[in-house]
Amino acid sequence: MEIITKICPSCESVFNCQQTPDGPCWCSQFIISDEKLKYLEEKYNRCICPDCLQKVSEK
């Protein structure tokens, strides 16, 4: 499994992306509505960290 270190465009914290050909990344465990997913895609050009994704999923 390749772990890619990224910087969150929302809060600038460092986090790891763990998407692999054999399975999804940690972010797939979040349930995000289509509306919120569209918002994220429009606002950020890359992945956000677990904490920020958690906050969006709870709104």
Image: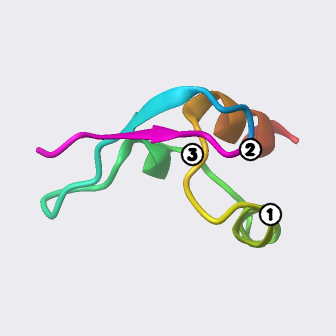
Q: In which quarter of the image is residue 59?
A: top right
Q: Distance between the residues labelled 2 and 1?
A: 15 Å
Name the amino acid, label 1.
Lys
* Quadrant, the N terminus: top left
Q: Using the image, tell me which numbered label, if any, was put on residue 43.
A: 1
**Marker count (numbered):** 3
Residue at 57 percent of width and 33 percent of height: 50
Q: Give the range drawn in magenta.
A: 1-9
Circle 2/circle 3 CB separation < 8 Å: yes
Amino acid type for the residue under numbered disc 2 = Ser
Task: Write down the residue under mark 3.
Answer: 30
Is 43 on the left-hand or right-hand side of 16?
A: right
What amino acid is labelled 3 in the image? Phe
**In-front residue for pair 9/59:** 9
Judge left or right: residue 12 versus residue 20. Answer: right
Residue identified by numbered label 2: 57
> Circle 2 — which element?
helix
Of mark 2 and mark 3, the one earlier in the sequence is: 3
Residue located at (15% from left, 64% from top): 21
